[in-house]
């Protein structure tokens, strides 16, 4: 389970400044509940399979991964600038944020390569006809 918050640029800029000390809005920020996952814990929860997912224990709530915050204004602006349908770019940012919650990062070239590959793998699940020019 995760929380998704949609903001405008002004609120996102404030969150970006308060969280990272950076000026201006950004497209997506992820806040994991479990800091150990963010530091390289399990990356197996987002697997692609033909098998149905396991039935959760009805006595237990699903685990909370964290919160993904997306600026809708930045998403629309960046989609227009890149000539990409904004809904697809929104999905891209959502996947990116969820992967951060699952422990993926892009701090090193190897981490970035793994995160990028996983992002596009999941994008192709949501948008099978998507063309990836950089892959």
Image (cartoon, rainbow, N blue to C red):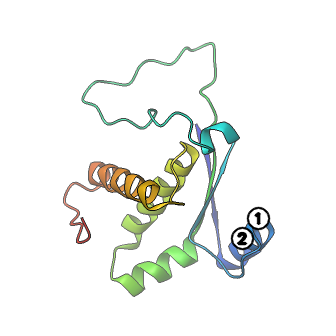
Quarter of the image that includes the N terminus: top right
- Tell me: residue 16, above or below residue 42: below
Cα separation, mark 2 vs mark 1, equals 5 Å
Image quarter of residue 116: bottom left
Task: Classify mark 1: residues with Cα within 10 Å, few (<14), some (14-19) or many (20+).
Answer: few
Instruction: Identify the residue position indicated by label 1 in the image.
Output: 19
Task: Classify mark 2: residues with Cα within 10 Å, few (<14), some (14-19) or many (20+).
Answer: some
Report the front residue among 135 and 3: 135
Q: Position of residue 91 (x, y in %)?
A: 42, 59
Q: Position of residue 49 (x, y in %)?
A: 28, 31
- Tell me: residue 129, above or below residue 13: above
Instruction: Identify the residue position indicated by label 2 in the image.
Output: 16
Q: Residue at x 58, y 46 (%)?
A: 101
Image quarter of residue 63: top right
Q: Residue at x 49, y 49 (%)?
A: 99
Q: Which mark is residue 6?
A: none
Label 2: state its secondary structure.
Answer: helix
Q: Position of residue 61 (x, y in %)?
A: 63, 23
Image-based side of 2 in relation to 92, left or right:
right
Contact? badges 2 and 1 (CB < 8 Å):
yes
Q: Residue at x 54, y 60 (%)?
A: 107
């Amino acid at each position: 389970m995760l929380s998704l918050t949609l903001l405008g640029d002004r609120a996102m800029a404030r969150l970006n400044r308060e969280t990272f000390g950076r000026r201006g809005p950004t497209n997506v920020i992820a806040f994991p509940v479990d800091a150990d996952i963010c530091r390289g814990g399990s990356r197996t929860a987002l697997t692609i399979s033909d098998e149905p997912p396991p039935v959760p224990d009805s006595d237990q709530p699903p685990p909370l991964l964290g919160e993904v915050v997306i600026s809708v204004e930045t998403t629309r602006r960046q989609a227009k600038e890149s000539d990409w349908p904004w809904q697809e770019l929104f999905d891209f940012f959502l996947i990116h944020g969820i992967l951060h919650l699952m422990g993926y990062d892009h701090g090193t070239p190897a981490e970035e390569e793994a995160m990028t590959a996983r992002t596009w793998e999941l994008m192709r699940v949501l948008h099978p006809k998507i063309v990836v020019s950089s892959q």
